[in-house]
Amino acid sequence: MALNLNKNLKLYYNIHEVAEMFGLNESTLRYWEKEFTYLKPKVSGPAKIRQYQEKDIEQIRLIHNLVKVRGFKLAAAKKIINANRDGADRRTDVLTRLMDIRTELQALRKQMDFLT
């Protein structure tokens, strides 16, 4: 069996790590947890440390796409997610793939500029 180097071995992320992933404040994530009831990270210990799993990060990615990238208000984002969950997920996946492709193309462009 081949070694999968792209596999993410981390099961839980703390709120600081997730906030950095999306360029958000930790308070924004806490607020989104109150507004979007399906966003429920695991809370452990007396300090109530939030532990986000991949499924939680996908939810945040969807909300981030609608609110921060596309500019919807929170109420509109809730309506879109509730009305067409699968369509909103697919659009977020496409946007993520396009952003990854853009990053790769920019890296290739830098390499080409270096060669000339």
Image (cartoon, helix red, strand yellow):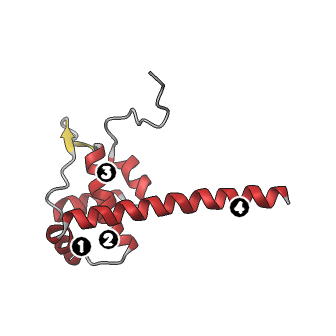
State the image coordinates of residue 56 (x, y, percent, origin top left).
26, 50
> Between marks 3 and 2, how big is the CA–CA gap?
14 Å
Q: Nearer the viewer, residue 93 or 36?
A: 93
- The residue depicted at 28 percent of the width and 61 percent of the height is 89
Q: Which of 38/48 is in front?
A: 38
Q: What is the distance, in whole Å, between disc 4 and disc 2 at their CAs?
A: 30 Å
Q: CA distance from mark 1 to mark 2?
A: 6 Å
Q: Which residue is mark 2?
A: 66
Query: Which of the two marks, 3 or 4, is nearer to us in this view?
Result: 4
- The numbered mark at residue 57 is 3
Relative horizontal placement of residue 63, taking residue 109 as reference (left or right): left
Q: Earlier in the sequence, mark 4 or mark 2?
A: 2
Callout 2 secondary element:
helix
In the displayed structure, 71 sits above or below 45; it is below
Q: CA distance from mark 3 to mark 4?
A: 31 Å
Whether pointer 1 and pointer 4 mark residues with C-beta atoms closer than 8 Å, the reply is: no
